[in-house]
Each structure stands twice: as C-alpha cells, then as structure tokens.
Image (cartoon, helix red, strand yellow):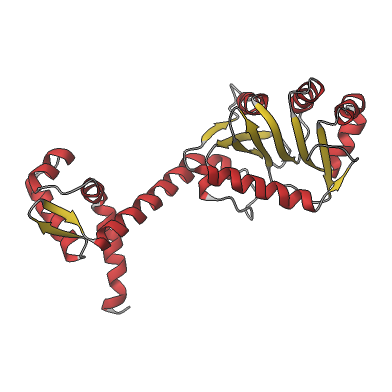
Amino acid sequence: MTASEDVPAETIATVTRRSSFLAALAAGPKRKRDLRDELGVSRSTVYKAVRELDEHGLVERTDDGLVLTLAGRMVESAYATFHGTVTDVSRTRELLASLPRTVDVPSALLDGADVVTAERHAPNRPVRLFEELVGDADVVRGISPVALPQYVDLFHEQAVTGELAANLVLEKPVVEYLLTEYGDEFGETLDTGHLAVWETEATLPFGLVVVEGKRSGVGVVAYDERGELRGLVVNESREAVTWGRETFDDYRSSGTRLRPGPVQ
C-alpha cells in the first residue's frame, strides 16, 4: 500500500478518535480552553487533538477561535450519520437477526424508531404496540406472512364498526387458514367493504403495517422461522413511511385480489 493510500485510513482513525472535538466545533467557534472545559479533558489532550485535526485539514484558527474547515464540516456530518446508523443497528440487531439475511431495509426505518421485542416474561409486548398503532388508524396498508388470532379480532372489530379501512397482502397459506379457521369472521369483514385482501404466492419476509390517521407511521414485524413474533419496529418519519408504502405497493402488484370492493 502506498503512502497516499494510507491517508484515508489515517484520517478515519483520527476522526474516530477525535469525534467529540469535531462535534463540539460543529456548534461554532471555540477556543482551546472552551474545548477543555466542555469536554472535560486536559490541556495536553486538547493541544494534541487540535494538532491532529489540523494535520488532516479539518480545523483552522480564526480570530474567534478554532473552527471546522469545509472538509471538517463534511467529515463531521458524515461521521455523525455513520455513528447514528451503527448505534441504530446495534440496538436493533437482535430483531434484525430474525429477518431473512437477504432482506433490504433502509437505515431510515431504524433512525429514531421505537423497538419492542418479545421477551420471555412479556411475549405480547409487540402485539400490544401493533394494536395501538392500528387502533389509532383510519387507513391501514399491510402485508403479513402469518395470521395471529389477535390480528383477526382486531381487524374484524375495526372494519365492522367502520372505524378502519384496511388493504392487506397475505400469503396464500394465510388466506387458506383464515378461510378454514375464521371463515365467518373473515367473510363478514370482507363483506363490510372496509377490508381488501390480496393473496400472494410470494414468501413475505416480514410483516408490514403502514397507518394513516391520528398518527402516520410504519411498523415492521419480525417473525422467526416458526412464525412466532419476535418484535416490532415502529417509525413515523416521512422516509420510513414512504418506504413502507412502496414496499406494500410492490407486493400488492403481484397479488390477486380475493373479491372486488371499494377499499384501495
């Protein structure tokens, strides 16, 4: 490896080591004593950090104190984004491990998300969050590879009372199960005109619910290989909701609607 090829690695190492100084300077000009007081470090640590950042062209001295250069601002912003992504992935890695290895989900889904996992002492916590999300909705779009009894009761009650319009894409075995085990409830829900169901031959990698109403948001439901619920990620950001709608539309386009009706 040539000396020039070493430069990015050295810069990355410096940025990682001195990220707290970059974050402090991102707020505006600061003198060395201000950095020492704000970060709670020694004078020698401040001098060493400033020297290293200066060597990589990330800071410069002005009459108002030390400031980030353009390169420094760009690097600080990129590092903050990277650090946030790693933090989000780390706190959700148990849930992500329940999803198929080939699944792609955007980092926007995890950024600032509420994450609830099924614990041994509280296996129904994700279900309660799901019920809360759907219960506040006027319109729901979703996909599901499983049929939990709680889901059946929830959608039946909401649709029959006219409080919810739902569009669902379900795996073929799920539809067959619903027709066999919940034929009357399922048929009554469809007859209300407030539920539209598309049957798909595809294997759905996770559950998905996109809601509109008192709150807009998207929820991704993770199941293990036995179909047991492992957890739920809920995010209300515009980016996450847009991804959820697009994902629903992709699966709906390849499905077959069970019967005509007004809900779309």
Of 79 and 116, nearer the camera is 79
Question: For residue 183, which quarter of the picture?
Answer: top right
Image check: 202 left or right of 213? right
The residue positioned farthest toward the bottom in the image shown: 2
Please indicate, yes or no, whether residue 97 appears anywhere in the rendered image.
Answer: no
The residue shown at (73%, 37%) is 227
Of 29 and 36, nearer the camera is 29
Residue 138: x, y in percent?
Answer: 69, 29
Question: For residue 8, which quarter of the picture?
Answer: bottom left
State whether residue 145 is above or below residue 195: below
The residue shown at (65%, 34%) is 211
Q: Quadrant of the N terminus?
A: bottom left
Please indicate, yes or no, whether residue 188 appears anywhere in the rendered image.
Answer: yes
Residue 244: x, y in percent?
Answer: 63, 45
Of 190 and 184, nearer the camera is 190
The residue positioned farthest toward the front in the image shown: 262
The residue shown at (28%, 77%) is 4
Q: Quadrant of the C terminus?
A: top right
Q: How many marks?
A: 0
Residue 205: x, y in percent?
Answer: 70, 47
Residue 209: x, y in percent?
Answer: 67, 37
Image check: 121 left or right of 183? left
State whether residue 37 is above or below residue 124: below
